[in-house]
Image (cartoon, helix red, strand yellow):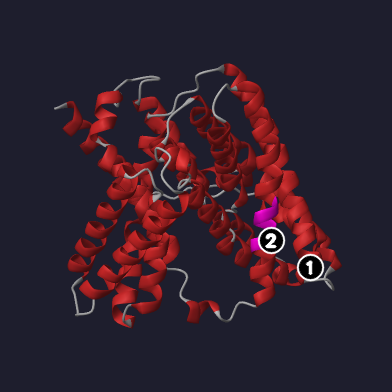
Amino acid sequence: MKLVFAAILIVAIAFIGSRLSFVHIRLPLGVRNIFLTGIEYVLVGLLLGGAALDLLDTSTLDGLYPFVGMGLSWIGMLFGVQWEFRRLSHIPRRVFGVALVQSLITIVVVAVPFLLLFQSLYAQETQLLVIGAVTLAAAASGTASSGLTLFSRNTPAPARPVMRLLTNVSNIDDLVGLTAFGLISCLAVLHAGASTFAWIGVSVGLGLAVGLLIVALTAYRLKDDETLLVVMGAITFSGGLALYLSLSPLLVNLIAGVIVANMARGRARAGIRTVLLRGEHSIYIIFLILVGAGWRIESVWLLALVPVYVLVRTLGKTLGGFVSVRLFLPRSRALGGLGLGLLSHGGMAVAIVVNLHQIHRSEVTDAVISVVLLGIIVSELIAPASTRRLLGRTQ
């Protein structure tokens, strides 16, 4: 009975929350940025969980476990269907270069110091510590495009090219972190010593199979509710199987989404994209509430890692922006500080660390989740000022 009541309550909160918007409320930009990430629903989940009301206790969360897999799958699929190559062809290749290189540099800059920190703090197998550090870095590498939308409406004309570049980069750079995490989740240490390459093959094969299945089932003209049924069935199956195999539903459904975006018929492709966008907010809110309900800050000293995370992420973004601009936009010296406009944190970061926690639970994964969730709040508070500073330089 408690499980049913909890499920109804969460769905009700998601239904109401998906129809609320805090963007137009007169609040400081940093606070509005936090609302755009949805972190407030993590705090709602924390309140409903064992930390406060205990409505979503451990046994109840176990019963709602499939919703987490569905949320991860939905996020991966939605990101994947955006990669329709014909639509992306208008974006210059150098912009892809900037996005991917700065994201890769951020991963390296964040992963190395946190691997050293984890080695000094935890007595675990080195490969597990590597997985924790790389997952943290993968979460740090992306940028929230939602935070940039607050600036795009009132951007002065001289700064609009920079804003377009920032928006394009933020739409692309999650690809590096998501792929890095998807691949590291295939390491043998998470699969009883089985071949890493074999599990990479399983991830790719499962993504291809799900994508082709959706393409085949939507080859005929379907109604919206039929398309929704196909999509939900596919992502629930793929997400559940991926988690059962200790793989990443994010990567599996990213691959499936790319297949759909480039192989499905035009009408079917548009219908699938519409279904995913229509359910995005509700599914994401449910996902965040469950994340918050299961969140535990086991040690107060973890709070000391949050400023370290924000600092090295800022350093990685700044260095990554500088190097990538020098490589791909050498004539645009004013863009050397591009990384200052890429500090806003996206929802993909939450999905990545939660995915790790679903396939491997330990002190390290608990620390990774806490550091990233708290780091997102801090990053969203400082991101508007750094973006404003970058745009001011280009005017």
Does the residue at mark 1 contact the one at mark 2 (Cβ under 8 Å)?
Answer: yes
**What residue is shown at x 59% (from left), y 53% (from top)?**
142
310 above or below 182? above
Residue visible at 65% across and 48% down in the picture: 107
> What is the quadrant of residue 323 in the picture?
bottom right
The disc, 1 or 2, on the residue closer to the chain's N-terminal end is 2
Q: Amino acid at mark 1?
A: Leu
Q: Amino acid at mark 2?
A: Val
Residue 333 coordinates in the image, percent (x, y): 86, 66
- Residue 381 in percent (x, y) is at 64, 40
Mark 2 closeness class: few <14, some 14–19, many ≥20 residues within 10 Å: many
Q: Name the residue located 42 percent from the left edge and 34 percent from the top edge.
A: 360
Where is residue 303 shown, x and y percent of the image?
61, 24
Q: Secondary structure at mark 1?
A: helix
Residue 26 in sight in this render: no
Magenta portion: prevailing SS class: helix
Q: Where does label 2 land, which residue?
A: 101
Q: Which residues are magenta?
A: 100-105
User: What residue do we see at 29% from left, 54% from top?
Assistant: 238
Camera-nearest residue between 187 and 42 = 187
Q: Position of residue 216 (x, y in %)?
A: 23, 75
**276 relative to 61, above or below:** below
Q: Does residue 287 lie above or below 362 as drawn?
A: below
Residue marked by disc 1: 327
Camera-side residue: 177 or 230? 177
